[in-house]
Structure formats: C-alpha cells, structure tokens
Image: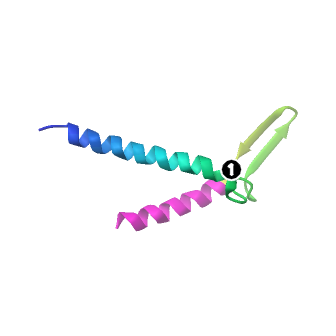
Amino acid sequence: MNPLPEFGKILIGLGVLFVIIGLVLVLAPRIPYLGRLPGDLIIRRGNFTFYFPLATSIILSIILTLLFSIFRK
C-alpha cells in the first residue's frame, strides 16, 4: 500500500485552494460593495478600529454553500 498517490492528491487540492484564495484576494477590491454592506460592523474609538464584515460573511457563505452543493452532485 503506497501512500504517495493520496498525498499527491492532497497537495494538488491544496495548490488549487491556494490559487483560488490568491485570485479572490487579487480580485476582491474590484467587486463593488464587498465588505461595505449594511450589516457589516465598524467600531471606531480614537485610534482603534474594529471591523467585522458580518453581512458580507453571510452572503459569501450562502454563495459558497450553493456552489459546493452544485459541484458535489
């Protein structure tokens, strides 16, 4: 039993995942309203800023869930 083919598949999957994450990071600033939706929390106190993109996270979660369910079948 040779574990190398399974390890190769894991490395390929991680590589694809890193490419997708890289593309999202490069293209995210060009998507309008991403990160500035109503429901995204911004708290500013003096020189401290806390930002939590709640609405953006929920929408991205719904989109990814739909995509994964489509490609899983």
Q: Is 67 situated left or right of 58 in this image?
A: left
Residue extending farthest top? 47
Main SS category, magenta section: helix
Q: Position of residue 28 (x, y in %)?
A: 64, 52
In which image quadrant can residue 6 be found?
top left
Q: Nearer the viewer, residue 21 or 38?
A: 21
- Residue 38 to residue 52: above or below: below
Q: Nearer the viewer, residue 62 or 24?
A: 24
Task: Inspect the image, locate mark 1, and give the three-letter code of the amino acid beneath it.
Answer: Pro
Q: Residue at x 70, y 53 (%)?
A: 35
Residues shaded magenta: 55-73
Residue 23 belongs to magenta span: no
- To which residue does mark 1 refer? 53
Q: Regarding mark 1 in the picture, which secondary structure is present there?
A: loop
Question: How many numbered callouts?
Answer: 1
Q: Residue at x 34, y 40 (%)?
A: 11
